[in-house]
Image (cartoon, grey):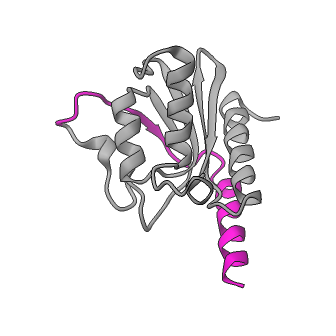
């Protein structure tokens, strides 16, 4: 039986699998408000030929549209891979309450692997970060994708 947080991460994993099926780097993200999934996104950089089309950015845009505001106060985000600097900045700017991360990104992670933008004391908003939620499942999708890509 999955916990509520694991159920939400499962939804992010579904988004990662959707990206994988399209040949995109398999990262998925969802936004939750008051226990309800309000937005989801997956990487679409190749499809859109847009460097900003990361899963987190896609989910944040959809959540803002649904709520009618860019201020996502009280919202949580679940993401299968540690955000990069661009996405970490957007998460901070959007005022996400809690960020749940699956796998860590030792090459580009901005939540502690390479740099930790969430702990810069000068920023006016603090995001609570929970690490390693379903890390094995999230990491396996990425490992399989890049192994297949190298063949």
Q: Is residue 133 left or right of residue 96?
A: right
Residue 116 percent location from the top left of the image: 32, 50
| Residue in the image at 37% along x and 49% along y | 86
| Residue in the image at 42% along x and 18% along y | 73
Q: Quadrant of residue 137?
A: bottom right
Name the foreground residue: 51 vs 78. Answer: 51
Name the foreground residue: 150 vs 61. Answer: 61
Residue interval drawn in magenta:
122-151
| Residue in the image at 28% along x and 42% along y | 119
Is residue 78 positioned above or below 108 on the image?
above
| Residue in the image at 73% along x and 34% along y | 7
Quadrant that contains the N terminus: top right
Name the foreground residue: 2 vs 37. Answer: 37
Name the foreground residue: 125 vs 58. Answer: 58
Q: Is residue 27 left or right of residue 67?
A: right
Q: Is residue 54 left or right of residue 19?
A: left
Q: Residue furthest left?
A: 122
Residue 45 percent location from the top left of the image: 55, 56
Q: Is residue 141 magenta?
A: yes
């Amino acid at each position: 039986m999955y916990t509520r947080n694991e159920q939400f991460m499962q939804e992010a994993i579904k988004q990662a699998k959707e990206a994988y099926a399209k040949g995109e780097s398999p990262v998925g993200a969802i936004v939750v408000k008051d226990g309800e999934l309000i937005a989801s996104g997956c990487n679409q950089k190749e499809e859109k030929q847009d460097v900003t089309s990361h899963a987190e950015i896609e989910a944040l845009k959809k959540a803002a549209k649904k709520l009618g505001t860019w201020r996502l106060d009280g919202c949580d985000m679940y993401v299968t891979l540690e955000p990069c600097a661009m996405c970490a900045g957007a998460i901070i700017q959007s005022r996400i309450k809690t960020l749940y991360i699956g796998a860590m990104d030792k090459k580009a992670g901005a939540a502690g692997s390479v740099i930790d933008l969430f702990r810069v004391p000068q920023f006016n908003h603090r995001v609570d970060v929970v690490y390693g939620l379903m890390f094995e499942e999230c990491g396996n999708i990425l490992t399989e994708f890049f192994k297949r890509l190298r063949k």
